[in-house]
Image (cartoon, coloured by chain):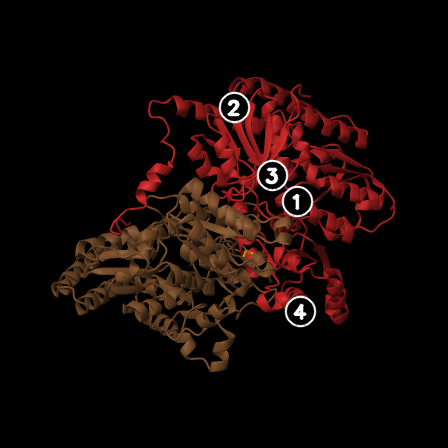
Chain colours: A red, B brown
């Protein structure tokens, strides 16, 4: 695809992470469990991790987030968490009757190294009331990986726990989609529409569109209020095909194929003309039907959009940061429009990003991004990059997680021809606006500079307020 | 060592709750209570310590631990600054698996060194979290060594999450200030009208609404602990004449510690509510005069109070017709409840209830008294209300607006009921006389927003009343006019 040599992957050698880009793996796992119907994710750890993850998801999705904790303390951490897990499972079952509990370990409990599988067995033996509650155990120490890692591990755990091994009778019209966490609830909805347009019946796992799409339930629901139904997960072996979207879904896709024999097709992304074409050809092949007229029309709209917008992208320099699959998706999109990726930063090791059309990909933080973004036309990163972007004097386009200061992020669509078109327009408009701001006589305010801050250290105590 | 410190915090003699406990109860502490596995829980001790100290705007707040603690929480608290931004950058050692296996002390030291080289802060606060505490990283020692070698204060904040609640963390943060910061610099300009304000975090920059009152009276805020403060302010805070405690529960140990070590009396006051703001100013003036300020301060304070109160009530009267008769559910951590009730009642609003989840008995009595002032109607004191019950209250139209923190907002919104944030993440300052006016103004904007009529109206194809046995979503009284 690209003629340039592969990008070098650079691991930041700093001991000090400044303006973290990465969020924790347990948070990613919890988010994945938000995509199962009637589910309650439960962190096995001290309570703070839960509170932080909960608040962050609440503020990003602007939805109520059921998330619980085993509330480990110093003593139980030393003695072992069996009793806390047991109490938590019993309390949750009694209060909220979830169909599924996603039991997610954290750094604290992983450091101690508990025999969670054994503990769960003991707990089940002691408490027959738990017989009807499915528990999916996910191992996600905070000190390894990030959001996508945790999401991937949770999806694999769902498959390993809930999908029976062995072949099942196939249903030619059923497809399974393993969706990465870079897809928004809006993306999932779009994907379902596209698949249904081919006369296929999709099961999407996890399905955030049911629980985090902002609809109003008729009563207060203490668990997730939508998502992939348990029965559908248990019958994934009946699908004609599995489609795994995003590198962090690759392992889950392989695992599902291994357990059920259903062949998995891997799509590295579903944004961008070429990538969506691949999706369409695949769906046409699975369904034996031609690509519907409506989608063909959208394709030609996208081509028109690409031509209209490329003037805004060509020759610009961009700075991009995010979890690996998000970076891959958006990076290939903007490169494909003639923009140059001057700085790329990602949160965890991701060798596949060597395929990006850029010189180096740094595994690092938003400080690394700001330091490399000087002179860029636009920065694309999560909302935490607001100050780093200001510091680098570059306008910020918000993408990824978390975006705490914009409305409707859950409904953004970047998937499919239509989603690609809208995303290209949104990015192109951001570039136009950034260029106008830069050319305006009153240029953007000077970067926050250290000398100024330093001068402030000696301020008199009177100068408050 | 950390357990000793925690035990001493639990033994806080000035804590009113503590005094009511038996020796055995006291030993159990206040942090572990309420932590039921599988039942709602709030922030951890680290969170509490960070909330208490992060408003120090010019230092590097370095979180020692894996990404969970800082990566999921940095720069989400809306506390204001009048200058430095360094407190908002989010610093962490982001421990990896290898660090956990080999111990994180070396990485911590290197991180401190890098922070000094890159950001040249006047000091560094290092926060201990669960995982390094568990593997035995000795941050006190690392901080000591770093301090000596690098020549700046490096302050250990020993509050790993698992030792207890956010509330305990506030106190552990205060302990760190007492042990390592306050009293380490002698200011040359100490005066007879210097005060500290303890437990004011400058949420939404709201201290700016109060500050001019002190300026006018010639009262100097030596240190606001810790809203919008600089390291040097804190280090010289021991020269103040009076300490005001904004929330006794958060940092009472700091008030007591400063009284014992430097003889500074403290009192508890509040800037929420008009009466409370006046009372607070009065107390400060009286105490300062007792401690050597000129006696005219009291008269000047009374004059300022009279003027400001008259101004505030006059301005608020304009909102009365728009708010009278509306029903409010106050669902806060506690302290703010009774401070605000009076103002709402003056607006002719009915406070249908206020929560006292985290309140002391004293707070509860005050809340009750405040509610009883209401014309005949007595609101309720709630403990925690379960979400389904709260949702039912809104659906049945028992309240027109809820004032609470962000976590419970969707219970109101999903039931199509107005909601206003009065906690950490809000974007409007509500402190002082001007703040109360702002609160009333914001409430008017929210409760009288035309959106409510739209979202409550049934779809044209839905029958006005649902089938029998099903509660109608919109109580008849609240339906939009046809
Ligand atoms: S509970 Fe421990 S690990 Fe979790 S956020 Fe708090 S300090 Fe960090």
Residue at point 76%, 27% (across, down): A281
Q: Earlier in the sequence, mark 2 or mark 3?
A: 2
Q: How many marks?
A: 4
Q: Which residue is mark 3?
A: A323
Image disc number at residue B277:
none
- Label 1 – label 3 distance at C-alpha: 9 Å
> Farthest front residue?
B149
Q: Earlier in the sequence, mark 1 or mark 3?
A: 1
Q: Earlier in the sequence, mark 3 or mark 4?
A: 4
Q: Secondary structure at mark 2?
A: strand
Q: Are marks 1 and 3 in contact (CB under 8 Å)?
A: no
Image disc number at residue A83:
4
Residue at point 60%, 62% (across, down): B469
Q: Which residue is mark 2?
A: A317
Q: Are marks 2 and 4 in contact (CB under 8 Å)?
A: no
Say which of B214 and B474 sits in front: B214
Say which of A369 and B364 sits in front: A369
- Same chain check for tags 2 and 3: yes
Q: Quadrant of residue B290?
A: bottom left
Neighbor class of circle 1 (other Cα within 10 Å; few <14, some 14-19, many 20+) is: many
Q: Which chain letter matches label 1?
A: A
Q: Which residue is mark 1?
A: A149
Q: Earlier in the sequence, mark 1 or mark 2?
A: 1
Residue A206 x, y percent position in the rendering = 68, 46
Q: Which chain letter matches label 4?
A: A
Neighbor class of circle 4 (other Cα within 10 Å; few <14, some 14-19, many 20+) is: some
Looking at the picture, does residue A414 appear above or below residue B71?
above
Cβ of mark 2 under 8 A from ligand 1: no
Say which of A168 and A50 sits in front: A50
Q: Secondary structure at mark 4?
A: helix
């Amino acid at each position: 695809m690209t003629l340039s040599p592969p990008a070098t992957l650079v691991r930041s050698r700093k001991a000090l992470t400044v303006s973290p880009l990465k969020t924790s793996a347990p948070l990613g796992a919890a988010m994945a469990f938000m995509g199962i119907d009637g589910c309650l994710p439960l962190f096995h750890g001290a309570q703070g991790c839960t509170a932080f993850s909960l608040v962050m998801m609440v503020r990003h999705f602007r939805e109520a987030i059921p998330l619980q904790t085993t509330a480990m303390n110093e003593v139980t951490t030393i003695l072992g968490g069996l009793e806390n897990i047991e109490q938590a499972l019993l309390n949750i079952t009694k209060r909220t009757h979830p169909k599924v509990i996603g039991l997610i370990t954290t750094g604290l409990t992983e450091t101690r190294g508990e025999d969670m599988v054994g503990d769960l067995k003991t707990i089940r033996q002691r408490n027959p009331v738990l017989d009807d509650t499915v528990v999916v155990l996910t191992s996600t120490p905070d000190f390894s990986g990030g959001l996508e890692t945790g999401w991937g591990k949770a999806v694999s755990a769902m498959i390993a726990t809930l999908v029976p091994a062995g072949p099942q009778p196939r249903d030619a019209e059923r497809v399974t989609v393993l969706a990465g966490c870079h897809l928004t609830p809006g993306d999932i909805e779009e994907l379902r529409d596209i698949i249904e347009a081919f006369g296929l019946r999709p099961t999407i796992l996890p399905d955030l569109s049911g629980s985090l799409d902002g609809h109003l339930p008729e009563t207060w629901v203490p668990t997730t209020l939508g998502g992939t139904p348990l029965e559908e997960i248990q019958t994934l072996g009946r699908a004609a095909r599995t489609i795994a979207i995003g590198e962090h879904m690759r392992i889950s896709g392989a695992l599902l194929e291994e357990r059920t024999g259903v062949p998995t097709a891997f799509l590295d992304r579903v944004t961008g003309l070429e990538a969506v074409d691949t999706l369409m050809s695949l769906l046409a092949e699975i369904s034996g039907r031609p690509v519907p007229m409506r989608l063909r029309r959208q394709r030609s709209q996208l081509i028109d959009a690409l031509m209209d917008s490329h003037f805004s992208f060509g020759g610009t320099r961009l700075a991009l940061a995010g979890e690996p699959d998000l970076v891959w998706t958006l990076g290939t999109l903007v490169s494909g429009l003639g923009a140059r990726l001057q700085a790329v930063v990602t949160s965890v090791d991701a060798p596949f990003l060597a395929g990006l059309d850029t010189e180096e990909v740094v595994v690092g933080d938003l400080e690394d991004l700001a330091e490399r973004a000087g002179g860029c036309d636009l920065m694309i990163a999560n909302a935490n990059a607001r100050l780093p972007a200001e510091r680098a004097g570059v306008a910020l386009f918000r993408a990824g997680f978390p975006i705490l200061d914009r409305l409707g992020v859950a409904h953004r669509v970047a998937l499919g021809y239509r989603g690609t078109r809208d995303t290209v327009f949104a990015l192109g408009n951001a570039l136009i606006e950034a260029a106008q701001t830069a050319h305006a006589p009153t240029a953007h305010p000077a970067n926050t500079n250290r000398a100024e801050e330093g001068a402030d250290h000696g301020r008199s105590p009177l100068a408050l307020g | 060592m950390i357990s000793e410190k925690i035990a001493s915090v639990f033994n806080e003699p000035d804590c009113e709750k503590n005094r009511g406990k038996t020796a055995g109860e006291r030993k159990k502490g206040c942090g572990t209570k309420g932590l039921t596995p599988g039942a709602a829980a709030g922030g951890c001790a680290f969170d509490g310590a960070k909330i208490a100290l992060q408003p120090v705007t010019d230092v590097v707040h370095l979180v020692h631990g894996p990404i969970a603690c800082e990566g999921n929480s940095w720069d989400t608290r809306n506390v204001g600054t009048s200058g430095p931004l360094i407190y908002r950058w989010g610093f962490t050692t982001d421990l990896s698996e290898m660090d956990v296996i080999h111990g994180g002390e070396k990485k911590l030291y290197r991180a401190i060194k890098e922070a000094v080289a890159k950001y040249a802060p006047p000091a560094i606060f290092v926060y201990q979290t669960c995982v390094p505490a568990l593997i035995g990283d000795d941050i006190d020692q690392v901080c000591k060594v770093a301090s000596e070698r690098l020549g700046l204060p490096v302050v250990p904040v020993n509050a790993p999450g698992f030792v207890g609640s956010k509330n305990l963390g506030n106190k552990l943060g205060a302990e760190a200030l007492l042990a390592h910061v306050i009293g380490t610099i002698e200011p040359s300009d100490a005066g007879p009208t210097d005060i500290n304000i303890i437990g004011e975090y400058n949420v939404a920059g709201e201290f700016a609404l109060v500050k001019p009152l002190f300026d006018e009276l010639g009262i100097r805020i030596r240190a606001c602990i810790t809203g919008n403060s600089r390291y040097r302010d804190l280090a010289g805070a021991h020269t103040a004449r009076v300490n005001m405690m904004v929330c006794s529960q958060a940092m009472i140990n700091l008030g007591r510690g400063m009284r014992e070590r430097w003889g500074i009396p403290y009192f508890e006051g509040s800037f929420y509510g008009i009466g409370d703001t006046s009372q607070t100013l009065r107390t400060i003036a009286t105490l300062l005069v007792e401690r050597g300020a000129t006696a005219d301060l009291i008269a000047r304070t009374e004059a300022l109070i009279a003027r400001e109160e008259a101004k505030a009530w006059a301005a608020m009267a304009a909102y009365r017709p728009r708010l009278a008769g509306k029903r409010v559910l106050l669902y806060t951590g506690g302290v703010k409840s009774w401070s605000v009730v009076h103002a709402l009642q003056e607006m002719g609003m009915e406070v249908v209830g206020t929560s006292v989840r985290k309140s002391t008995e004293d707070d509860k009595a005050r809340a009750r008294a405040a509610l009883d002032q209401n014309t005949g109607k007595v609101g309720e004191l709630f403990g925690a209300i379960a979400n389904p019950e709260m949702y039912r209250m809104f659906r049945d139209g028992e309240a027109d607006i809820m004032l609470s923190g962000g976590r419970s907002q969707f219970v109101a919104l999903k039931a199509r009921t107005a909601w206003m944030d009065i906690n950490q993440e809000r974007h409007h300052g509500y402190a002082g006389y001007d703040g109360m006016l702002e609160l009333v103004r914001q409430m008017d904007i929210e409760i009288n927003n035309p959106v409510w009529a739209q979202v409550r109206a049934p779809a044209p194809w839905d029958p006005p009343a649902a089938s029998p046995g099903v509660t109608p979503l919109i109580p008849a009284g609240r339906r939009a006019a046809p």
